[in-house]
Amino acid sequence: MPGRSDDAGSDVLDTYLADLAGRCGPAVFEAVLAAVRGTCAMLSEGHPALLEGPDGTAFGPQLQREYLALLAVLMTGRTDLEVIGVPTAGGTAGWAVVEPDVAADPDAADAVRARVAAGEADRAEALDVLASAFPPPRRHPR
């Protein structure tokens, strides 16, 4: 775990991984571990991470959720954080890691979802402005 070398940190991670394996089954567990290992390696080398599920299949919602939860444990050393679903403009599921009291409070969870949606809308608007200011080059016919 980043920043932790004591036995307590290892125990937290070992306990979390055992729970994850029991919750997901072997194929999903291995896919989540492979994705996290790959992500850590790619990020440490300055590359973006690409994700896939078992046997090269799509990295679906269950894998996304477990992947994010495991990354949260690795980054914080905490197993009490929760992953909540966040709808996106494209209609696909997004995720947010929140404190347990936020996940338990529908109004607080909706406030997080609203902040994430507003941030996504701002990013999309900024990309539209950039695309209109810097259109892709036109290809000349050969």
Image: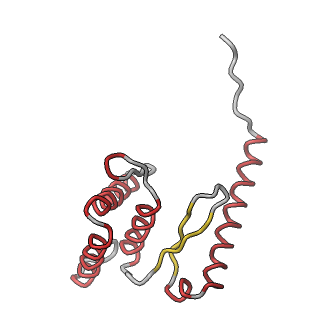
Q: Residue at x 30, y 77 (%)?
A: 16
Which quarter of the figure has residue 70?
A: bottom left
Q: Residue at x 25, y 77 (%)?
A: 5
**x then y, percent, for residue 68:** 44, 67
**x then y, percent, for residue 55:** 31, 47
**x then y, percent, for residue 11:** 23, 81
Which residue is farthest left? 7
Which residue is farthest top? 142
- Tell how many labels: 0
For the rendered model, the colour scheme is secondary structure
Question: Would you place residue 115 above or below residue 50 in this image?
Answer: below
Left or right relative to 125: residue 52: left
Q: Residue at x 30, y 61 (%)?
A: 33
Q: Residue at x 26, y 79 (%)?
A: 15
**Viewer-side residue, 21 vs 138:** 21
Which quarter of the figure has residue 38?
A: bottom left
**x then y, percent, for residue 124:** 70, 54
- The C terminus sits in image quarter: top right
**Viewer-side residue, 44 vs 100:** 100
Left or right relative to 104: residue 18: left
- The N terminus sits in image quarter: bottom left
